[in-house]
Amino acid sequence: MALALPGAREESFLDQRAFCIRRTIFATVSSDRTRGTLKLDPLRQAALLAAHPRAFQAAEGAWGRRGWTHVDLAQVEHAQLAEALLLAGRLASPRPVKQRARAQAPTSARVDPRMKRSSSH
């Protein structure tokens, strides 16, 4: 499932399978394939933990506070895992296309938000 995300590739990391986009790990699977770990933003992590407490648990300590989330692969439903992987993959992906296009636009085409015209002319 993780390899279906654009730019995703599989690597070995600490005796686990790790899934990366560019150089950023967004998911791992334990060697016994009973548990996965995903990197989510803390708000989305909190929502998943509240909605599916048997399937998702925050990692211990600072790792968990930064969004690393364990997944019990025996408890998670396919759709839940697919959604969580998509969220993790998006977080690891390069800037969205819209931001890249804006950054690549000629300087004359960019609008500085501080230079908005006031309607009180």
Image (cartoon, rainbow, N blue to C red):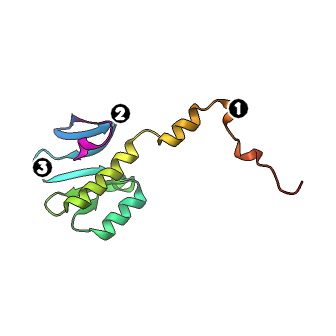
- Contact check, label 2 and label 1, Cβ < 8 Å: no
Q: Residue at x 24, y 41 (%)?
A: 3
Residue 7 in picture, x, y percent from top left = 32, 36
Query: Looking at the picture, which amino acid does disc 3 mark?
Result: Arg
Residue 59 in picture, x, y percent from top left = 29, 55
Name which of mark 1 and mark 3 comes first in the sequence: 3
Q: Nearer the viewer, residue 113 or 11?
A: 113
Q: Residue at x 32, y 51 (%)?
A: 86
Tell me the SS state at disc 2: loop
Q: Residue at x 32, y 39 (%)?
A: 6
Q: Is residue 9 magenta?
A: yes
Q: Is residue 47 left or right of residue 28?
A: right
Name the front one of labels 1 and 3: 1
Name which of mark 2 and mark 3 comes first in the sequence: 2
Identify whether 106 is placed above or below 51: above
C-alpha distance separating marks 1 and 3: 52 Å
Tell me the SS state at disc 1: helix
Q: For the magenta stretch, what is the residue range?
A: 1-10
Label 3 neighbour load within 10 Å: few <14, some 14-19, many 20+: few
Name which of mark 2 and mark 1 comes first in the sequence: 2
Residue 71 in picture, x, y percent from top left = 22, 57
Identify whether 50 is placed above or below 10: below
Q: Residue at x 69, y 41 (%)?
A: 111
Name the front one of labels 2 and 3: 2
Question: Mark on residue 22?
Answer: 2
